[in-house]
């Protein structure tokens, strides 16, 4: 990375898994508004479903998710019962038994529910939704807790894709982040899943962790590529100890600097691109024949709270504490504290904490940001014309001068050099962003 690019790399910007981002959600959208929006979902369209389980057996030092550690089975069982009740509650506000095309479980570690617990939730989902034409059923798993029995049970429940949270395979890095899982453990988990017939395999990695180097990241990527996953996601670690107390356990002195982070990200791209993977957007890689790679080549790639996807549904209904729903009228998020969540459910009230309505002008900006994040280009004439976005040409000039982007007529493109900085260009179309913000992750 050129020294002139360091100021760009140090800027803090959202990851843009939505627009508006969750930072703009407000309590002005509550349970009443949420219920009205659910009632206006098109009954003829299929929807996607997301279930959030905010518990792990142990909390990793790097984690930035809405989750907590527990070893109490009663706590997990009580949460599952509330999750089932929420599904029924939400279904009561929908205009009928909608068709669902996709199911995704996230966390936390959803498998903490156990096979019987997941089966119980699935039974309630099937009461509330038509699951006869599910295209993909995905779940996030911790490799340390995947055995043959769990893999078989998940396959029996219709799971078709698993994301394994690996992060890094270097023993020193694993110790520093509180996530010790030798390569043999990961390989065993992969073997169990494949033996059970689960064909879709994602592996999640992170760069920018304590004690990571370009050399160690390359080694991890080579080991992961040898396992042959269909997809790999590699995110830059966002160190925000002021917001996540568990991250205070990380030795900041051991974190790589900006230049080293850039080299690590480049190393990830080089290793996977050299082993038959197509780069997808900012931080994903997929086999050339994978549906995600095909969608990227056909410019049908989308981006939502799960990252890059080929899911083109307008409606994503989220269940569980802190879950986000994307509805035709806007976004809503349930309350994050589990106690508050369970109390609302017990009272028969949607546990809505906040949200935001989305009108036509905001949707146009959302299209621009999504196309930049997915395709690294957008024709502004397709979304209202360049004149709609004020002095955008002037604000782009520093990035054009640095060779990161070009604006030709109405077409805005990221250069090859500028692709790692695409979030900065996306932020120029974000009406809520201002220079100097530090509440988001760094651009690199």
Image (cartoon, helix red, strand yellow):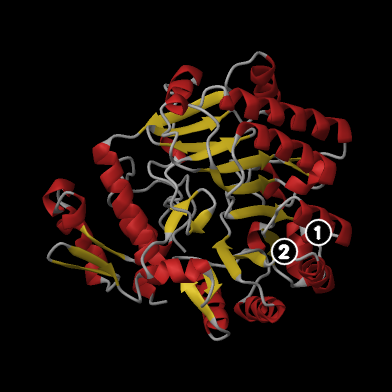
Q: Along the polypeptide, which appears first: circle 1 or circle 2?
A: 1
- On the image, which quarter does residue 257 sit in? bottom right
Measured as percent of width and height from the top left, residue 214 is found at 60, 78
Q: Nearer the viewer, residue 118 or 374?
A: 118
Residue 280 shows up from this direction? no
Q: Which residue is mark 2?
A: 198
Residue 396 horizontal side relative to residue 49, left or right: left
Instruction: Look at the image and tell me in which quarter the N terminus lies.
Output: bottom left
Q: CA distance from mark 1 to mark 2?
A: 8 Å
Q: Residue at x 68, y 52 (%)?
A: 139
> Can you say whether 218 is above or below 162 in the image?
below
Residue 362 horizontal side relative to residue 317, left or right: left
For residue 232, the mark is none
For residue 151, the mark is 1
Q: Residue at x 80, y 64 (%)?
A: 196
Task: Count the numbered circles shown.
Answer: 2
Residue 79 shows up from this direction? yes
Measured as percent of width and height from the top left, residue 146 is found at 82, 59
- On the image, which quarter does residue 108 sit in? top right
Measured as percent of width and height from the top left, residue 423 is found at 38, 58
Q: Residues within 10 Å of mark 1 (few under 14, many from 20)?
A: many
Label 1–label 2 contact, CB within 8 A: yes
Regarding mark 2 in the picture, which secondary structure is present there?
Answer: loop
Q: Nearer the viewer, residue 345 or 27?
A: 345
Regarding mark 1 in the picture, which secondary structure is present there?
Answer: helix
Measured as percent of width and height from the top left, residue 135 is found at 57, 55
């Amino acid at each position: 990375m050129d020294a002139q690019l360091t100021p760009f790399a140090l800027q803090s910007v959202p990851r843009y898994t939505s627009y508006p981002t969750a930072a703009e959600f407000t309590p002005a959208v509550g349970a009443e508004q949420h219920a009205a929006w659910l009632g206006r979902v098109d009954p003829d369209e299929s929807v996607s479903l997301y279930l959030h389980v905010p518990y792990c057996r142990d909390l990793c030092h790097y984690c930035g998710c809405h989750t907590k550690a527990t070893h109490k089975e009663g706590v997990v069982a009580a949460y599952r019962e509330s999750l089932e009740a929420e599904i029924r509650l939400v279904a009561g506000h929908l205009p009928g038994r909608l068709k669902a095309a996709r199911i995704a479980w996230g966390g936390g570690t959803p498998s903490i529910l156990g096979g019987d617990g997941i089966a119980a939730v699935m039974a309630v989902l099937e009461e509330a939704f038509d699951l006869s034409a599910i295209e993909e059923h995905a779940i996030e798993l911790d490799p340390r807790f995947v055995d043959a029995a769990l893999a078989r049970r998940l396959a029996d429940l219709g799971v078709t894709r698993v994301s394994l949270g690996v992060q890094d395979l270097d023993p020193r890095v694993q110790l520093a982040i509180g996530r010790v899982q030798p390569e043999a453990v990961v390989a065993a988990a992969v073997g169990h899943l494949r033996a059970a017939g689960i064909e879709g395999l994602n592996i999640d990695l992170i760069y920018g962790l304590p004690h990571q180097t370009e050399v160690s990241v390359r080694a991890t990527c080579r080991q992961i590529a040898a396992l042959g996953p269909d997809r790999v996601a590699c995110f830059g670690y966002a160190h925000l100890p002021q917001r996540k107390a568990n991250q205070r356990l990380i030795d900041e002195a051991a974190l790589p600097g900006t230049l080293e982070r850039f080299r690590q990200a480049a190393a990830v791209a080089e290793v996977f691109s050299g082993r038959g993977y197509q780069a997808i957007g900012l931080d994903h890689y997929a086999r050339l024949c994978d549906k995600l790679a095909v969608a990227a080549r056909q410019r049908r790639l989308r981006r939502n709270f799960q990252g890059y996807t080929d899911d083109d549904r307008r409606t994503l209904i989220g269940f569980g504490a802190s879950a986000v729903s994307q509805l035709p009228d806007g976004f809503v998020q349930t309350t994050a504290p589990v106690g508050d969540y369970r109390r609302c459910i017990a009272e028969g009230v949607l546990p809505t904490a906040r949200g935001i309505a989305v009108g036509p002008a905001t949707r146009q900006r959302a299209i621009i940001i999504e196309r930049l994040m997915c395709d690294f280009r957008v024709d502004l004439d397709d979304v209202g014309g360049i004149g709609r976005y004020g002095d955008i040409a002037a604000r782009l000039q520093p990035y054009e001068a640095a060779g990161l982007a070009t604006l030709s007529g109405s077409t805005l493109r990221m250069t090859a050099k500028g692709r790692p900085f695409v979030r900065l260009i996306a932020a120029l179309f974000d009406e809520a962003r201002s220079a100097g913000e530090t509440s988001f992750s760094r651009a690199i």
